[in-house]
Each structure stands twice: as structure tokens, then as C-alpha cells.
Amino acid sequence: MVYVNGLMPWCHRLFSLPEERFSVSQSHDTIISIQSSEFEKVISKIYDESFTMVCIFASESAVPDSKPTLTYVFERTGYAGFLILKLELSTENVISIGLPFPTACLYEREIRDGFGIEFINAKDNRRLFLHENYPKEFHPLRKTFRNRPVETIQPVPPDEEYQFKKVHGEGVYQIPVGPVHAGIIEPGHFRFSVIGESIYNLEVRMFWKHRGIEKLAEGKTPEQAAALAEAVSGDETAANTWAYCTAVERISGMLVPPRAEHLRLIFAEMERIYSLLGDMAGMSIDVAYPVGACPFFNLREEILRWNDNLSGSRFYKGAFVIGGIRKDVSAEKLTELTQYLKSFSERYEDAVRSLLAQPSVIDRFDTTGVVRSELVAPLNLTGPIARASGVPTDVRIDHPYGLYSKLIPRIKILDGGDVLCRFNIKADVIKNSVELIERAIGEMPVGPILAESKVKDGSALSAVESSRGQNVHWVDIRNGKIERYKVRTASFCNWIAIEFAVLNNIVPDFPLINKSMNLSYAGTDL
Amino acid sequence: MVGMFDNIMKPKITENFSFEDAELEELGIALKNKIDKVFGGSLAIREVDTGSDNSPEIELVNLTTPYYDIERFGISFVASPRHSDALIVTGPVTRNMALALRKTYDATPEPKLVIALGDDACDGGIFKNSYAVLGGVDKVIPVDMKIPGNPPSPKEILKGLFALIRQIERQ
């Protein structure tokens, strides 16, 4: 059960702050502006009431000498609206909240790089997305920095090299992997500390692909910036553009026509299907059973061709526009799709059944790479990973958007937290996505596919469920241009899960555990 | 668990997978003939992602799956630059990946070819003028062939490879 009325009355009692500090957004988010002096008290109350930290980001207004604002986003089970704290900084320092909310450490490092804001008592002050080739005192998201090439530090002095966690003791050795890997995958660096064959510690270093998407969006019109939302992560194109468009539509008070809502849902669910099919194929490959992967690969290719057929792009590039979708899909095509999905389901279920009938596959999947359920809330793990560890979370249900308030997805929960559970959860998600598409086609209304209204100024938060979990977008528009665009994909949080999941597993199981989560590097690095 | 008993008790039947794509077959055979002639039967490719949005990787992996199965045309993706004849680079070159790309290029034995795959890799695409991006692949290492697209489809990639080999043949 989700309360749509938001957290407002509840927050009122909790924080006992004056009325004028509270406001409620169109999507029932409760926004509270707080001052530095109240910050610690409010955070400790939020912690006591077991809120989950969703995201922290900074923003700055273009007005000269203005102070940056920190925005803290929280959610609470059962409430559709988010809790958004706005903290206007009076100094350049702020207390770190890494202790109560461990994921805050990552956001604080990100903000420190982007804005040069220091966090008092922060446990980790290493750079995050700015690797050591960037000059010191360089903070690209400050408004005083105009986007341009910067000087490269090379070679990097030895004392300024990135410091990995040091693991001491007899018999411990390190395996550095990446950023260039052996397969056709994205770049990331994995530093294993291993005793014998079991992994004692893993540290993941990301942001090799940092392309500066957030800065590039600034100063662009909302229509232009949609191309950047698409580029956040290729296999989450539909999810991210939907989230971006939703944020802009919320700001402008646009009502997306019902036909467009139905088609958006179909596109997003098709994307979920092909993305998860790739994960399942990859898991089969990584246990040296390529025969089992082939049917999944074949089905994925068929879905990619359907994507092209429906939208003109195999990845839904350019399919979503602010206010609706770009191109309508004919009724004949949709009927054809329904028929195709019937044959898809049959072959898909066969493929799952025959893969799980292999004792050698089960032997590798079962009890491998366990993510304990206690980690889910503190690390804000979302998507199939959280649901495989016994936590019922899905943005489509918790914070309904688009058509999901009417077509409610059915989610499966398993509590083993291992590779096998993640496989089964993903297998079930695909089945449910097929059902959702069939229902959307079944009740497809006729009418326009684009809302007729202008983009207005303002800011809004939106969250969607991508194939990997919760993706959050924040858009701020001033004078018709993007002032601040913040993206946080599910991968950003879920990467930490892998550092825990691999512990005490053997190194050869790492690729399998990695594939069972299949996180996006591009979506993390931005 | 029934599935497991089936696996032991029932006869094994291999799936008969067939589909027809005349264009792909034609393209593949033409490519194979060229590879046989120019590369002595096999072209080994190492892929490097320097900042793509991961869709080019999906298409490249697709080339190795049953629908395309380009290994039958003599093209294989290898795990190390030391084993490769050509590099396929995807994405604009980010500052953070520039050194890794340079090292991968240096580790590739001569003579070597470089293919920039995707709009971003060709000239930086929508990431031009970002502080975090140096530009297209040719800003960092010499490029022999550019295959544009967002991302290019598997067939477009094969066409690009064909064009590249024809270009070498002429030299």
C-alpha cells in the first residue's frame, strides 16, 4: 500500500519547524528548507525514523557570489513522495553524514570534486570522478567554470596517485584488473586482495568513462538536453529519457496524453526485457555453458529488431520527447507484437527451464555471491538485486509514474540473495514485463501522442525503475535553459553491493557475480 | 526438479535454429573472401571502450551471437591487444581513459589498424567541448576507419569492416 498524500503532515510533527519552510511538489514530494544550525538534529531524526537515503547533490545559482545549496533526498517505505531537504550553505563546510548513511560518502566525494565543498569528519576524502590527471582545485560544476578543455597532469607524481585500501597480512596478494578488460565490456578497475583463492577484499574504482554529462546539460534547452539523458546509459535509454521527460513535464505541469503513456510503458518494458535477457545470457556464458546462453541471445536480438520496428531505433534513441513520444505506432504493428510475444514467451520459458535443469549451472549459481538483506536499506540497493535479497522495492510500485498507477506490476521476492536468486528474479521480471505490454496493448486508447504546452521554469525530481533499479533525475530550468541536471542511476548505488557479494567467494566466480548484477559503468560515471 | 530428471532420463534433442538473412550472408561471404586474401584467413580484433554509452558494446557482442556469428567469416574478438590486428574503439575519449587507450594502442603489434565506432568515437559527437572529453579517437591515436551511428547496427559494423579491408587492399 502506497500513500499518495505524501510525507507532509508527518514531517510537520517530526521536525517542528515553522510552516513556511515546508512545501509540497506536484508529485507529492515534501520539500523542507533547513539551516546549517538545524541540520544535525533533522538528520538524526530522519535516521531514527529509518528513512533511506536516495541521493545528495549540490547546485549553484548563476548569480555571482551566491552560495551553493545541498539537496538531500530520502524516501520512506509506503510513501509515494520523496523527502527533499534543501540546505543553503553559509560556509563552504558542512558535516558529513557518512556515519548514519553509508552511501553519503560517495555523494560527498562527488560533491567535493564537483563543487569543492568540504565535509567535516568525512571518512574518505579521495577524489571520485576527477582522476589524478585533473589539476588540483578544479571544480567543474561551479558556475564560475565555463566548459572548456583543462590542463592535463601527466605524469602523475607518485604521492598523488590514487590510494587503494591497503590489506596487510601473511599470504595476502593483490590482483589488479582493468580498466581495459578481456571481454567486450566497459572500463572499470577492480582491485582484489586475495588469500589463496578466496577474495578477502575488493575495491571497485569507477569513473573512467566520466564524460561530464551534468555540466554539458547546463545552458542547453530542455529539448537539446534530452540527447544527454539518452547517452547516460545505452541499455537504459528508455528509462532515463522517460525519467528526464517526466521531470520536465512535472515542472511545466504537462499532461501526457494516454496513448503516449501506453506506448511509453511498452517501450520501457521492451527495454527491460532485452536488457535482462542479456544478463541471463551472460550468466550462462560465465559458467562456461554457452549453449544455454544462445536462446537468450537470439531472443534479445529479436527484441532489438522489434525496438527498431516500433520506434526506429534498436535502443529507443530519440523515441521519448518532452510531452509524449516522437512517433506513433500503428494498430497493426501492435497486434503483430502481441502475436510475437506469445511465441516469445514459449521459447523464453523453455530456455529458462532447460538452463536451470543443468546441474553444473545450478552448482555455480547456488550460494554464490550472496548480498545480505541487511545491506539493502543502508546502501540503497534497488532493483532485482534488492528483490533477490528479500526486500520488496520497485519504483513502479513505490513511486508510481506514467501508467504504473493503473497497470500495477507484480513483483517476486526471494530471500537467498545469491546468483541463483538474482537469476530467478530477473527471469520473473521478464515474464511480468510481457504481461504488462500485453495489457497496455489490450487497452490502448486512440488520440494524440504529444502534449501541447510550453516548457516552464522550475525544478522537479523524478524516479523510474530501470532494468537495474531506481534511477533518479533532478532537473532545474531557469529562463528556458537547464540550470542544473543531476542523474543518479541504480548502478551508482548498486556497485557497492558487489564489493560485499564477492567476499569469501573464489576469484573465478567474480565474473559470474558481476554479470548477475550487470551494472552500468556509463550510468555510474556520467 | 523435474527438469533435472528430464535431463537424465529423456533423449537429448538439439535445437534446430535457422533463419534467413540474405543481405547478411552476402556481406559475410564477401568479407570472408577479403579477410582470406588480406589477413590470411583471420582478423583478430580487440575492443576498447573509452566512454561510450554501452550500446556499441551490446551490438559488438551481438555480432558473436548465433544471429550473426561473425567468427564464421574469420573475425574474432580477442582478449588482449597483443593478439590483435585491429582495435575497435567506442565512445569519445575521456580524459580518464586516454592513458589506457594509449597503452592499449602501444601494446598492439605492428602493423595495426584502428576503427572508431559510433558518432562519439568519430568526432566526439554530443560530448564535444566537455571538460572531461578529449574528442574523437583520432585526437589520441591514428584512426584508419570511422563507422558512424548511434550506435551503428551490426550490419553497418560489418559494412564498415568491409570498407576498411578494401581500403587496405588498394594500398
Image (spheres, coloured by chain):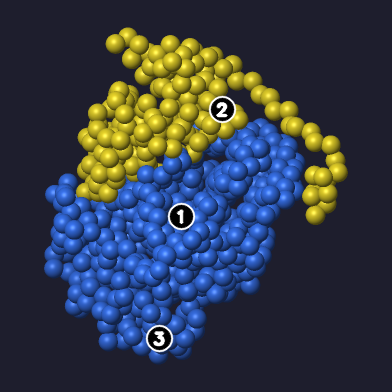
Mark whose residue sits in front, 2 or 3: 2
**Which amino acid type is shown beneath numbered disc 2?**
Asp
**Picture disc at residue A470:** none
- Identity of the residue drawn at 72% across and 47% down: A358
Q: Secondary structure at mark 2?
A: loop
Q: Secondary structure at mark 1?
A: helix
User: In the image, are marks 2 and 1 on the same chain?
Assistant: no
The quarter holding residue A58 reads bottom left
A360 to the left or right of B44: right
The residue closer to the viewer here, A240 or A424, is A424
**Chain rendered yellow:** B
The residue closer to the viewer here, A278 or A482, is A278
Numbered circles on residues, count: 3
Q: Secondary structure at mark 3?
A: helix
**Which amino acid type is shown beneath numbered disc 1?**
Ala
Q: Which residue is mark 1?
A: A243
Q: Label 1, label 3: how many angstroms apart (C-alpha)?
A: 30 Å
A5 to the left or right of A340: left
Q: Position of residue A330 (x, y in %)?
A: 61, 34
Chain of the residue displaying label 3? A
Q: Which residue is mark 2?
A: B69
A43 to the left or right of A27: left
A461 to the left or right of A210: right
Q: Residues within 10 Å of mark 2 (few under 14, many from 20)?
A: some
The quarter holding residue B122 reads top left
